[in-house]
Image: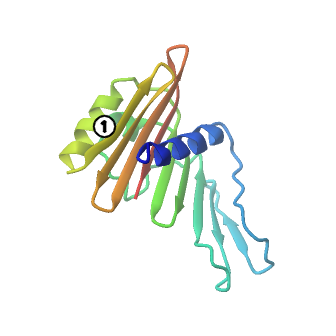
Amino acid sequence: MKKLLPLLIILVIAISSCGKKEIKIAGDDKSSDKKEQTKSGETTEKKSESSEKKDVKISVDAPKLPDNFPLDNSQLRKATIETIVTSGGATVMTFKPEGINKGVTSEIKDEIKKKGFEVSTEAATETGVALYFTKGEKSWVFTMSFEEGKITGVYFQYN
C-alpha cells in the first residue's frame, strides 16, 4: 500500500489537470515574485530569494520533448505534448492520446527495464494502467487512462 500511495497521488493530479490550459501554483503572492511567458506557451515562475519555494517551469502545448526526456519510445516521441511541468528535479508530462495505442505500455515497460529500472508497482483496470519504476533514488511513473475502451490520457513522470 505504501508503494501505491505516491502512484495514486500522481494519477489523481495528472487526471485532474487533463484538459486544463491554465495551471495555478499555490503559494504566497509576494510582490517580488515574477512570471514570464514565451511565445511557445512556456511559463516560468521565479520566486524571490526570500521565498522557500523552488522555481517551477510550466509548458502548455509545448512543441517538443525536453532535452532530458529519457525514453526512445517512438509513440511518445511522435505524440503531441499537452503540458510539461518541471519542479524540484522532477518532470511531469501529459500527452494527447491520438496516435498512441495500448501496446505502448509494454514497450515502455521493456525500455525502462533495459535502463536498469525495476517495476515496483503495476496496476491495471478497465479504466487505466499505472507503472511505477525505481532505480536507486530515481523513480519514474507511466500512467494511461481509458474510457469506453479509448485512451483518454497519457502521463509520464521522471526525475
Could you tell whether 43 is left or right of 131 in the image? right
The answer to whether residue 82 is seen in the rendering is: no
Within 10 Å of the Cα at label 1, are there few (<14), some (14-19), or many (20+) other Cα atoms? some
64 above or below 142? Answer: below
Q: Secondary structure at mark 1?
A: helix
45 above or below 116? Answer: below
Estimate the x, y position of residue 79 in percent, counting from the top left: 45, 36
Q: Which residue is mark 1?
A: 108
Q: Residue shown at 55%/46% (left/top)? A: 9
Estimate the x, y position of residue 110 in percent, counting from the top left: 23, 37
Estimate the x, y position of residue 108 in percent, counting from the top left: 30, 37
Colouring scheme applied when the structure was drawn = rainbow
Could you tell whether 21 is left or right of 130 in the image? right
Position of the C terminus by quadrant: bottom left
Estimate the x, y position of residue 63 in percent, counting from the top left: 52, 48
Q: Residue furthest top?
A: 148
Q: Residue furthest bottom?
A: 50
Residue flagged by tag 1: what amino acid is it? Answer: Ile
The answer to whether residue 138 is seen in the rendering is: yes
Could you tell whether 102 is left or right of 29 in the image? left
Q: How many marks?
A: 1
Could you tell whether 69 is left or right of 41 in the image? left
- The quadrant in which residue 41 appears is bottom right
Given residues 123 and 24, the one toward you in this image is 123
Given residues 78 and 23, the one toward you in this image is 23
153 above or below 36? Answer: above
Q: Residue shown at 64%/57% (left/top)? A: 39
Position of the N terminus by quadrant: top left
Q: Residue shown at 55%/13% (left/top)? A: 148
90 above or below 157? Answer: below
Q: Residue shown at 48%/18% (left/top)? A: 126
